Image (tube, rainbow, N blue to C red):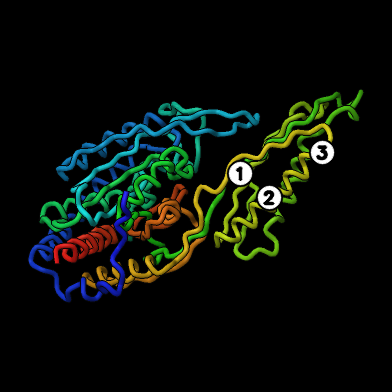
Amino acid sequence: MENHGPRSESARSPESAFPRAPDRATAEALRWLAGRREAMIERLRSWCQQNSGSENLAGLRRMADRLVDDFAPLGVACQRRVTPPYTVIDEQGNSESRDSGDLLLWRHAPEAAQRLLLMIHYDTVYPPPPEDADSPGEVGAAAPAACRLESEGRLVGPGTADAKGGLLVMREALLAVRRFELDRGIGWTAVANPDEELGSPASGAMLPELAPQHSLGLLFEPSLPDGALVAGRMGSGNFTVVVRGRSAHAGRNPQEGRNAVILLCRLLAEIDQSGEGLAGVTVNVAQLHGGGALNRVPDRAVGRFNVRVAEPSVQAEWLGRLAALVERYRASEGFEVELHGGFHAPPKVVDAAFGELQRRVERAAEGIGREIAWRNTGGASDGNRLAAAGLPNVDTLGPRGDRLHSPDEWVDVDSLVPAAQTLLLVIAHYAREARQ
């Protein structure tokens, strides 16, 4: 499919696309959103009370059902796609197939030449309560028992910022856009995926399909605690190493055994140092499983680690180092060494197309008196994947929040309306430009 990329700055600058004062319909939409603060807080509170941990399949289904109902006022039919199974390596080193939730899509004016992709996830890192668990495993930190609104205007609760607050911003802005017909001349697709907190192992394969159908991407991860938006992001990869050795009695014939735990520890120690001399590489060895009875030489061990890289070229060089290292250990007599995983999120580099999109977001924010600052980060998001597929995107258009992935996660409720208003102005300005 043809890639309808954003018009170049030489064809139309951001300054020419953004009038100094909003037209009547846009001004009315901004006022309407300003009156939605309390309704937004209550809807966010109710969403966060529904557990949708990445591995809580029942919770994901209930959250998806809720979103289908709550997005219905847009007047755009929801397409509910079953995501394919994904493979994980269990603690015994065996492959295991798992399911995820549904991918939700709302497509408006799919025939339009200029189309915007709006996207954010509805899963969280918080595991379900024991009575609600129906999955083989759990991820993340313990969730607070209930959302609470603190005196300083912070709503504390699971997913308030990451990323149900972003879902809310997307919904409210689109409601205003549709209500006041501000998207005439363009199309848009809104997407909510169920597995971003795991690295989008099920939905990630659908992103290269979506990217070329759109001109740009707008994603709703939370902005940084001081309100800044993210520019460049490091790439992120998750890897698993499985070592199989040979068991033996620790007293009678230990020399006949091949200790998988020891070999894996030696390998992981070298992996930990594998980024030395490469700029912008961090390695985090995070898990080790293996061993059993103390009088038995362990014949199996599993290790997991994460890698962050700043540049695509450095990513390729580090992968070469890793492959050589694993191959050397595979030559160890009596052992088998397997490497699984890869980079699920390539580095997101600030280029000319992203720079133009940055300026347009800045000009939109100026329309409500908001000043935008930008900062690079080591975190990864679906914005990395979309950028790698050729779609320039800004991926922190959600509300301001902090303490993500902890029981104290919070969102600044006073940032909800400005975030939605900023998005509304971005969409309205692209639509106005398309009509000219």
Residue 256 sits in quarter: top right
Which amino acid does the dot numbered 1 rest on? Phe
Q: Secondary structure at mark 3?
A: loop
Q: Secondary structure at mark 2?
A: helix
Which amino acid does the dot numbered 3 rest on? Ser
Q: Mark 2 or mark 3, which is nearer the start of the sequence?
A: 2
Q: Mark 2 or mark 1, which is nearer the start of the sequence?
A: 1
Please state the total of marks drawn on the protein image. Answer: 3
Residue 5 sits in quarter: bottom left
Q: For the residue carrying disc 1, how many other residues have a C-alpha within 10 Å: few (<14), some (14-19), or many (20+)?
A: some
Q: Secondary structure at mark 1?
A: strand
Residue under numbered circle 1 = 239
Which one is nearer the viewer's eye here, 422 or 277? 277
Residues tagged 1 and 2 counted as in contact (Cβ below 8 A): yes
Q: CA distance from mark 3 to mark 1?
A: 21 Å
Q: Mark 1 or mark 3, which is nearer the start of the sequence?
A: 1
- Side of 11 relative to 228 (left or right): left
Residue under numbered circle 2 = 322
Which one is nearer the viewer's eye here, 188 or 272? 188
Residue under numbered circle 3 = 332
User: Which residue is located at x 30 percent, y 53 percent?
Assistant: 214
Percent from the top left, x then y, of residue 426? Answer: 24, 63
Inspect this view and state whether residue 131 appears. yes
Residues tagged 3 and 1 counted as in contact (Cβ below 8 A): no
| In front: label 1 or label 2 | 2
Which amino acid does the dot numbered 2 rest on? Leu
